[in-house]
Amino acid sequence: MSVSPSAPPSASPSASSARSAPTQADLFDFVRRTAADSELIASLPLDPEGRTWVRLEGPGGSEAWLIGWPPGTGTGWHDHADSVGAFLTAAGELKENALAVRLPTDGWKTLELTDSVDRERRLPAGQGRSFGRHHVHEVLNESSDRHAISVHAYYPPLPQIRRYSRSGPILRLEQVERPEDWQ
Ligand SMILES: [Fe+2]
């Protein structure tokens, strides 16, 4: 990971002037600053029945989202193809389950994961992470009574994500979603 000193990210979702591709560090800085904007965080509509989203303008042409997570919701296992990204909890607490292994991108339907590839981290408000290409994870709000809110940024904007199911060590590719599927 390299930091580009010539392209400082902006704290404002409406101002984007980076000239080079944003790095993981740029994206992380953006989500950290955005999560600290209490007015923006409070503006997200929350729905007890399901997740809510507001699209933001990320730095340098990146794709960014403000996401609300009711208690007990999660993403399921997925990757972000060739995009790098960052996310950070602004309110409540999220948990990330991730794989510490680089998976082959294509040509397989099921994989048996070895022991010791699972990583788990709890992300209370103010905590987040960045990730590289082909990162595979699921994000959950395990609270029984509290919404979580988080800020996410991806670059390049997500061309596709792959969804997986997980049964013990077996990871199975279920679906490839493209942007038109998310509308
Ligand atoms: Fe993700």
Image (cartoon, rainbow, N blue to C red):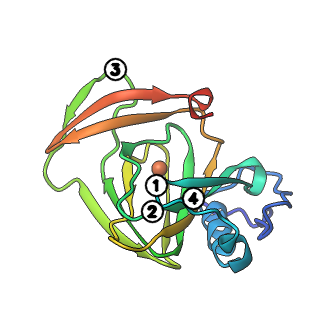
Q: Which residue is mark 2?
A: 70
Amino acid tagged 2? Pro
Upstream in sequence: badge 3 or badge 4: 4
Q: Which mark is residue 67?
A: 4
Q: Badges 1 and 2: C-beta atoms under 8 Å apart?
A: yes
Instruction: Give the number of the mark in front: 3 or 1.
Output: 1
Instruction: Give the number of the mark in front: 3 or 4.
Output: 4
Q: Which mark is residue 148?
A: none
Query: Does residue 169 appear left or right of residue 33 in this picture?
Result: left
Amino acid tagged 3? Gly
What distance separates the C-alpha of mark 3 from that of mark 2?
35 Å
Task: Classify mark 3: helix, strand or loop.
Answer: loop
Q: Which residue is mark 1?
A: 49
Residue 162: x %, y % from top left? 43, 34
Amino acid tagged 4? Ile
Upstream in sequence: badge 4 or badge 1: 1
Upstream in sequence: badge 3 or badge 2: 2
Residue 35: x %, y % from top left? 63, 73
What distance separates the C-alpha of mark 3 from that of mark 4?
32 Å
What distance separates the C-alpha of mark 4 from that of mark 2?
10 Å
